[in-house]
Amino acid sequence: MAAKGGFPSWLLDGKERISSSQDWKAFVAELHEVIQQQLTESHVQQFTDLSDAEKTLFMERAAMALQGGQAYDALYAKVSLTMDQCLSNEIARELLEESPINTKTDLILNNAKEGSVGILKKWPDLKSKLHVCFNQSLPWALRHIVWRLFLSSTKARKEYVDILSTNPRAAMSELDLEISQKCENLLNSETTVEELRGSVGAFYGMKAVLSYYHSRKQSRVSLTDIEYMLMLPLIYTASKSISRRDPPPSHVVAMLVEEYISLMESRPGYVVDSGSDIHDEEMKSFTFKVAQIIQERDSDLAIKLGQACIPSEKIITTEAARQSVFEEGLTTLVRPCIKALFVGFLNIDTVLYIWDQYIIGLDVPGYHTECLPVFTVVYLMLLKDQLMRCDDISAMETVLKEGSRNIKTSQFQYLVNRFFYRDLYGLLNKDEKTGLPVLDPTQTKYPPWHHWSKGRIPSHTTAETRRLAREQREYERERLLQQQREADDKRRDAEEQQRRDAEYQNKRRAAADLEKVDEEKLYLENLLDEERRRREESERRAAAEIERLQKEIEAMKGRKFKSPAPSVFSLRSVISYLIPAPPPSRASGAVTKFNILPPPRSPTPHDPEKVQAQRIMLDILGKVQQTIFKISQGDSKEAADLDKESREALKNHRNDFKFAEKQVFGRELRPGEFDSLPEDEKEKKSEEMMGVIKERIEGRRKAALNKKK
């Protein structure tokens, strides 16, 4: 069962158990000590001062130093035991809960495959650990990622993607039509890959790769049959991710291009066999090794092959000449199959098995000079019965071409395990003291996994028992569903109660705010009433004062004044009475030698009584006005404060009006623009503007009240 990160749940469970175990903590502590010792010897203060490559080197040295130690062996055994238990528990769970169709062995292999694929995708550098899979046919999902890791070529992929993005025509060969025809004929005629017959995706993928490969060679010479044949295993492996009806996507074609170019460039010289001197020498060395192995493992077959390689009319007297003729005949016999890497000679499953062994050793120098001769010898040994009945090389070539399609993978595995396993496995893992648990229990000192085989075989049950068990499972499922529903109901009730509580709190806060507003309103109304009473009292006092003054004026109007004869003294006395004397100045107070007399004035005629009464009345009214103004607006300081507040109110009113224009019209209006609007629109806009102005006035009022508090 898959879990997060692409890893199966049993693998994550095992990781958690291992990381929390005492064996892991002890190993990490020793690893830290060894790394610290290396840092001291290298005169390095901190591990973080190292580069990434140096950190990796220090870690590898420390791990190699701990291999074989007590902490390492304890951790190794803990990992093996934990993985065994976790995988077995997962298989038991699947058998109990999911009722799978596959057998227990199939489930174990599938889960192990999922774990391996997830680890390789996460850490591609661990591909060297796949050396433990030697002599095993990889599952498709594992083979797909293993081939992609070992045949990766960033340079080849980048070149193809760049050409495809800049000039797609350059990715096609001049012989694209010929390549298309040969690909179609090969897929329809090759019996070892009948599953690819009629597959549109396989055809287009194969044609695209070979066409680009030929254009990359920059040659007008057609591709060889071998170059076509070597594409078949790659396209067959990728066929499960390719639609049979549609061309493959571009990323799949790019992956196939990368794998094919890496494969062609990594071939040994005796596989390329271009006819050059270097390749001829490598072919001779290859044939010599094959002949040597056959003579060591199966002398009867070696003798028969030697006899068939020597023409009847040719007489050979020396052993060296006989060996030379034998090797030449053997070269003629095995050259076609080794150049094609057995494609077209064996069934596709066996070919994929051989390619698995070939590809997992691409990172080991010298491995191919040993493994391909071994598989060639095993190939001949499996056809021994048919070859022993042949009299010449041509008959043996026919046997190799036509009689080998029925050879099974298990037959190859048996002979390899019997005669060559130890040498080839040791060659693959020569740089590692220990590795992952190997598939052959005899090759490791640690006990093999056995938990999966300890489970009891379920006893035979009747239909009635199965029905009761099914009903019990159904009842348990319903019970769990009911529990889930109850939990959901409780959760919804809790959410509803929480919502109601929040709503109640909001209502309480709203009521408190409303009560506060009412109190403020009442307080302001009281202030307004008090101010109104003061104004009314002031107005009453002013009215009473005015009435009194009016009575005095009326009384003064009824009084008769005698007017004396006008004289200079009387005129001056009237003027001095009406006009107060100015304050003394510096000039008037100074003592001068000569007094400057005022210019002579003509005498002012005496005003009549009516004019004097009117003037007196005006003076009285002016005094009354000043008294009323002082009562209503106070003294000079209070008047200044009132003027300031009036100016502030006018300024706020203008700002409110401009803001309302922007809110309603989106801009400030020009003079007279509002009056030019229609009456309906003018009335509507006026209401909207008044609403905006009221909101701003209310906002300032609340701000002022909060500031007072």
Image (cartoon, rainbow, N blue to C red):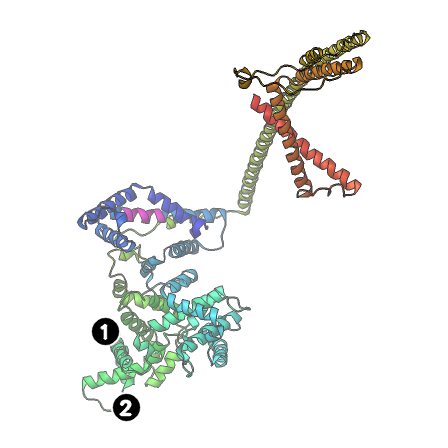
Which is nearer the eye, 81 or 414? 81
Callout 2: SS: loop
Q: Sort mark 2 into few (<14), some (14-19) or many (20+) by Cα contacts within 10 Å.
A: few
Q: What stretch is highlighted in magenta?
A: 75-83
Left-right relation of 478 to 561: left
Which of the two discs, 1 and 2, labels the residue nearer the N terminus? 1
User: 447 or 86: which is nearer to us?
Assistant: 86
Residue at 35 percent across and 77 percent down: it is 339
Instruction: Look at mark 1 in the image and give the residue it sits on.
Output: 296
Which residue is nearer to you in this view: 569 or 675? 569
Cα distance between the residues tagged 1 and 2 = 26 Å
| Residue at image coords 58%, 16% | 583
- Magenta stretch: residue 509 in it? no
Residue 195: mark in rendering? none
* Among the 4 quarters of the image, the one containing residue 488: top right
Q: What main secondary structure does the magenta stretch of the protein show? A: helix
Amino acid on which disc 2 is placed: Ser
Q: Name the residue under label 2.
A: 312
- Asked which secondary structure carries label 1, the reply is helix
Residue 655 in sight in this render: yes
Instruction: Find out whether the residues at labels 1 and 2 contact each other: C-beta distance under 8 Å.
Output: no
Q: Does the magenta stretch include residue 81?
A: yes
Q: Identity of the amino acid at label 1? A: Glu
Foreground pick, 589 / 26? 589
Q: Can residue 348 be seen in this view?
A: no
Query: Measured along the vertical axis of the image, is residue 6 above or below residue 254?
Result: above
Q: Place residue 566 in its image quadrant.
A: top right
